[in-house]
Image (spheres, rainbow, N blue to C red):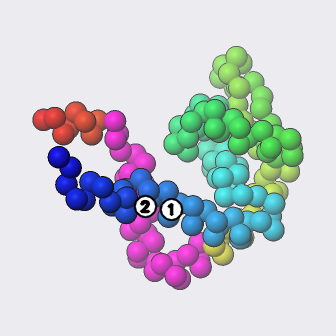
Amino acid sequence: MTSETDRKPEICNCLALRQATRRVTQFYDAFLLPAGLRTSQFSILAKPQELGPLTIAALAAAMVMDRTTLSRNVRPLRREGLVAVASGRRDRRSRELHLTEAGRARLRAAVTAWREAQKRFDAVFGTERAAGLRNLLHIGSASDLTRADEMEQR
C-alpha cells in the first residue's frame, strides 16, 4: 500500500529540478539571444575555452550529458563555424572539438550577457542562496545515484 505522499507529484525531486531548470534556462536564454546563442550552446563553447580541445566523450562527461545529445547540439555550432572537429593531439584516431576564432568571438560577446544574467539571478535569488544552490546542484550532479538501490538495501 502506498502512502499519501507517494502519489503527490509536487514532492518529486526530478519534476522540481526540471521545472526549475526550464525556468532558469528561459531566463538565461533571453539574455544570450542578442549574442545568437542559447544557454546550452554557451556552455558547449565555454568548456573547450576553459579546458582546451576535448573529445566529444570528454566534453559530454564534463557536462554530464549523453554523447548523442551533445553531438546533436554541436552540429549547429559546426555549421556556423563556431567549433571545428579535428584529429586528436595525442591519438590521431580520436576526434577533438576545438573553438574557432569565430567561436571565441561569439563566446566573448555572450559572456557580457551571461554575466548580466548571473547578476540579476543573484539579485532576485540572493547571492548566498544562489551560491548554496550551485553547491547543492554540483553535489547532485557528481553523485552516483545509480547506487541508491544498493544503499537502500543495506
- The percent position of residue 44, horizontal first and vertical second, equals 67, 48
**Dot 1 lies on which element?**
helix
Quadrant holding the C terminus: top left
Q: Circle 1 is placed at which residue position? A: 19
Q: Quadrant of residue 6?
A: bottom left
What's the residue type where badge 1 is placed? Gln
**Residue 130 in magenta?**
yes
Q: Circle 2 is placed at which residue position? A: 16
Of the pair 17 and 113, the residue shown nearer to us: 17
- The percent position of residue 131, horizontal first and vertical second, equals 43, 69
Q: Where is 6 relative to 48, above or below? A: below
Badge 2: few (under 14), some or many (20 or more) residues near its Cα, within 10 Å?
A: few
Majority secondary structure in the magenta region: helix
What's the residue type where badge 2 is placed? Ala
* Range drawn in magenta: 118-146
Q: Confirm whether residue 118 shows in the render.
A: yes
- The percent position of residue 33, horizontal first and vertical second, equals 77, 65
Q: Quadrant of residue 92?
A: top right
Q: Quadrant of residue 23?
A: bottom right
Q: Where is 136 relative to 63, above or below? A: below
Seen at 80% across and 50% down, the residue is 103
**Dot 2 lies on which element?**
helix
Of the pair 36 and 149, the residue shown nearer to us: 149
Q: Please tell me how many numbered marks the rendered image carries.
A: 2
Name the residue furthest front. Answer: 1
Q: In this image, 8 relative to 113: left or right? A: left
Q: CA distance from mark 2 to mark 1?
A: 5 Å
Seen at 81% across and 60% down, the residue is 36
Contact (Cβ within 8 Å) of mark 2 with mark 1: yes
